[in-house]
Amino acid sequence: MDKITIDIPGIYAELTNLEIGGLSKATIDDVSINVPYKLLRISFNTPNLHTEFDYKLNGTLLGFPVFGEGKGQLSLKNLQTELLIIFDIVKNDQGDDILEFKSFMYGADAIDGLHAKLENMYNGDKEKSKFF
């Protein structure tokens, strides 16, 4: 993945050169389809979703200023994800009914926690960085 930008009140971050691992270990817990409402629901669990990336960060977290630029790692343990897909039923070129996805929503919860490591927080200030 090339880049993720987080721009919310109080925090601005750019994550680049992302490498994501662990999705191959995901297991599907449930799949259901509600044809009258045109809704497909998929629930799955990923034991350990992990990423490595380069970051730039500037903002405030829990009232404390945070800033830095460097390498980062993020691990989400026991990640439970639910995906809702809204669809239409349309005809393909052969005249068969197929699902055409219109939009989707998702939610996720790292049941056993999120673990992060950000190198060079506070631009290398060891005293400030010890809290992270």
Image (cartoon, grey):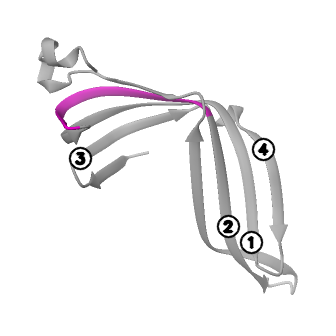
Chain-order first, disc 4 or disc 3: 3
Q: Identify the main secondary structure in magenta.
A: strand
Q: Are marks 1 and 2 in contact (CB under 8 Å)?
A: yes
Give the residue drawn at x 32%, y 41%. 15
Q: Secondary structure at mark 3?
A: strand
Judged left or right of residue 12, residue 40 is: right
Separation of disc 1 and disc 2 at Cα? 6 Å
Amino acid identity at mark 2:
Ile
Q: Secondary structure at mark 1?
A: strand
Residue position marked by numbered label 4 in the rendering: 28
Judged left or right of residue 116, residue 41 is: right
Q: Are marks 4 and 3 in contact (CB under 8 Å)?
A: no
Q: Quadrant of residue 53?
A: top left
Q: In this view of the protein, which residue sits in the foreground, 97 or 73?
A: 73
Mark 1 packing: few (<14 Cα in 10 Å), some, or many (20+)?
A: some
Residue position marked by numbered label 3 in the rendering: 11
Chain-order first, disc 1 or disc 2: 1
Q: Are marks 4 and 2 in contact (CB under 8 Å)?
A: no
Amino acid identity at mark 1:
Leu
Q: In this view of the protein, which residue sits in the foreground, 86 or 97?
A: 86
Q: Quadrant of residue 77?
A: top right
**Segment tinted magenta in the rendering:** 63-78
Chain-order first, disc 4 or disc 2: 4
Residue position marked by numbered label 1 in the rendering: 39
Residue position marked by numbered label 2 in the rendering: 85
